[in-house]
Image (tube, rainbow, N blue to C red):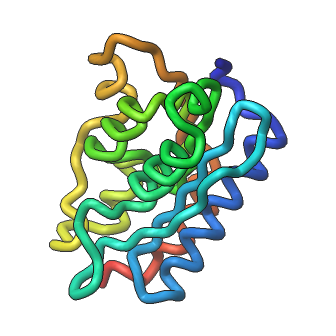
Amino acid sequence: MTDELTDTDREHLRTAIRVADQSRKDGAHPFGAIVVDAVGRTVASFGNNSLSPHGDPTQHAEMRAVAAASRSLGAAGMAGSTLFTSAEPCVMCAGAAYWSGIDRVVYALSERRLLELTGAHPENPTFSLPCREVFARGQREIAVVGPVLEDEAAAAHRGFWR
């Protein structure tokens, strides 16, 4: 797995950002994630679904995408897969990526930049724990690329967290 960003990676990341934009338009938090398998095929694409009254706080975009990809591909099929996400995976989502067998994570907006946008908003109590630190505690390596395209990803958050 590589830690370099390719043109195809940028396209996938922009897709995740578009999913985040759509999530906001749908009345949910502006986060989006896709999972791409080892041959470059998008196998899952989800926005956030954590808002009450119909959402579930565990239904972050990354959790939804990783779970769907894992169900679709199975454990062996997850080898070589990449999670592309509009924002750095939180502790919960990083754990899900680890346990599902994701081999690489590419994210746009860093947790630090997200905190600047959300402030102390009660719907997004952001952790100050980079996903790299979470993955470093595991027994297998997950390549991480990010933050990249932060300004593009930040656009969906502007004015949302008031």
Residue toward you, 70 or 123: 70
Q: Measured from the top left, where is residue 138 in percent x and y?
A: 31, 17
Give the residue displayed 53% in from the left and 36% down from the top. Answer: 74
Q: Measured from the top left, where is residue 139 in percent x and y?
A: 34, 11
Residue toward you, 59 or 69: 69
Residue toward you, 72 or 23: 72
Please state the total of marks drawn on the protein image. Answer: 0
Q: Residue 135, relative to residue 12: is it above or below?
A: above
Give the residue displayed 60% in from the left and 69% down from the top. Answer: 19
Point out the residue furthest to the top here: 139
**Looking at the rendering, in which quadrant would you find the N terminus?**
top right
Q: Measured from the top left, where is residue 37 in percent x and y?
A: 68, 38
Q: Residue 28, relative to residue 131: is it above or below?
A: below
Give the residue displayed 23% in from the left and 66% down from the top. Answer: 57
Tell whether 124 sits left or right of 44: left
Tell whether 76 sits left or right of 18: left
**Looking at the rendering, in which quadrant would you find the C terminus?**
bottom left
Give the residue displayed 29% in from the left and 77% down from the top. Answer: 55
Tell whether 129 sits left or right of 96: left
Q: Residue 82, relative to residue 62: is it above or below?
A: above
Q: Measured from the top left, where is residue 79 in percent x and y?
A: 59, 25
